[in-house]
Amino acid sequence: MTDSPLLEVTGLKKHFPLRKGVLRRVVGHVHAVDGVSFTIAEGETLGLVGESGCGKSTVGRAVLRLTEPTAGVVKLRGREITHLSKAALRPLRRQMQIVFQDPFSSLDPRMRAGNIVGEPLRVHGIANRRERQERVAALFERVGLRPAQMRSFPHQFSGGQRQRVSIARALALDPSLIVADEPVSALDVSIQAQVINLLMDLQRSLRLSYLFISHNLAVVEHISHRVAVMYLGRIVEYADKATLFARPLHPYTEALLAAVPLPDPALQRTKHRVEGDVPSPINPPPGCHFHPRCPYVEARCRMEPPALRDLGQGHMVACHLR
């Protein structure tokens, strides 16, 4: 990894309007992402974790401009891409790709797998037809599939094989950054390990950077270099993997780790666990978003949003009590 960030995200927000009535007037907003900042270096994996509905996937889509951000700045290799026109952004899309959660719904069921993987090459006008076929065959072999399977349709693959097709499609344009949005959550545990190992092998050989979005802490611990913990649209803790799992400082991170089952009941953690439900992102709590569920809450927490502060060695925490 290098010190210069490949991706810089600053103050990213995405608020979805709520409309009602015949005139579809805006009556409120869903605060899906509410001021997220992070960086990813070349060859690095940043794990983005949190409960369902916290805004993880929206962050990934906003970074790639699949969803237009409400506010904030996204820079790729130092170039600001947040406000680029679609025409100006088009060549940069070759550097940024995504692997979706459900490969069955993200692959066109009417297209053969070889055409699916080769479509990005055709869209961007790369190589002629024969060269594209050769390149697609090489991509199939790289992700552990047989070139003969290029003629198969998505329904003829297993779940793990379909995700390998999705990964091959993401690799077709030689990207620098891949957003992996829950890429193994729909797969069996044994297949999950194979896909994760494939992603790690590809990272080493191609020097890829990943934004790896997941709610599975075990998977994140295995693949990530650094981890960002999200809660209700905000990052509450951000540190290297070893530090965060050994010494979590935010009460929410503590609770997430306490909820992970351990093989020996005698080793079960004694830390508190999260109680209650996640508040609605339509009307998030004032102050610290976590304060209605926090066992250490103080008066200040209910009124003042905590800033994400560096407590040393890149360990950043958004908590008034730290």
Image: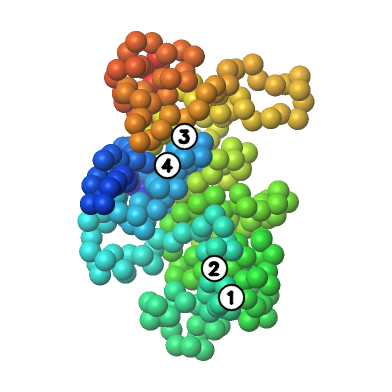
Secondary structure at badge 3 equals strand
Say what amino acid the circle numbered 1 marks: Ala
Judge by depth and name the residue closer to the eye, 216 or 205: 216
Nearer the observer: mark 1 or 4; the answer is 4
Q: Give the image location of residue 8, x and y in percent.
A: 33, 47
Residue 166, picture quadrant: bottom right
Q: Upstream in the sequence, badge 1 or badge 4? A: 4
Dot 2 crowding, Cα within 10 Å, few <14, some 14–19, many 20+: many
Residue that numbered label 1 is attached to = 113
Determine contact: label 1, label 2, CB under 8 Å: yes
Q: Position of residue 265 (x, y in %)?
A: 76, 23
Q: Nearer the viewer, residue 140 or 68?
A: 68
Q: From the viewer's perspective, is residue 85 above or below residue 319? A: below
Mark 3 or 2 closer to N-term?
Answer: 2
Cα distance in 3D space between marks 2 and 4? 24 Å
Residue type at numbered disc 3: Val
| 64 over 143 or under it: above or below | above
Query: Above or below — where is 121 with respect to 248?
Result: below
Identify the mark nearer the N-term, 3 or 1.
Answer: 1
Q: Which mark is residue 229?
A: 3
Tell me the number on the disc at residue 55.
4
Q: In percent of the image, x 70 and y 54: which residue is there?
A: 191
Closer to the camera: disc 1 or disc 2?
A: 2
Picture quadrant of residue 134 = bottom right
Separation of marks 1 and 4 at Cα, in angstroms: 31 Å
Tag 4's secondary structure?
loop
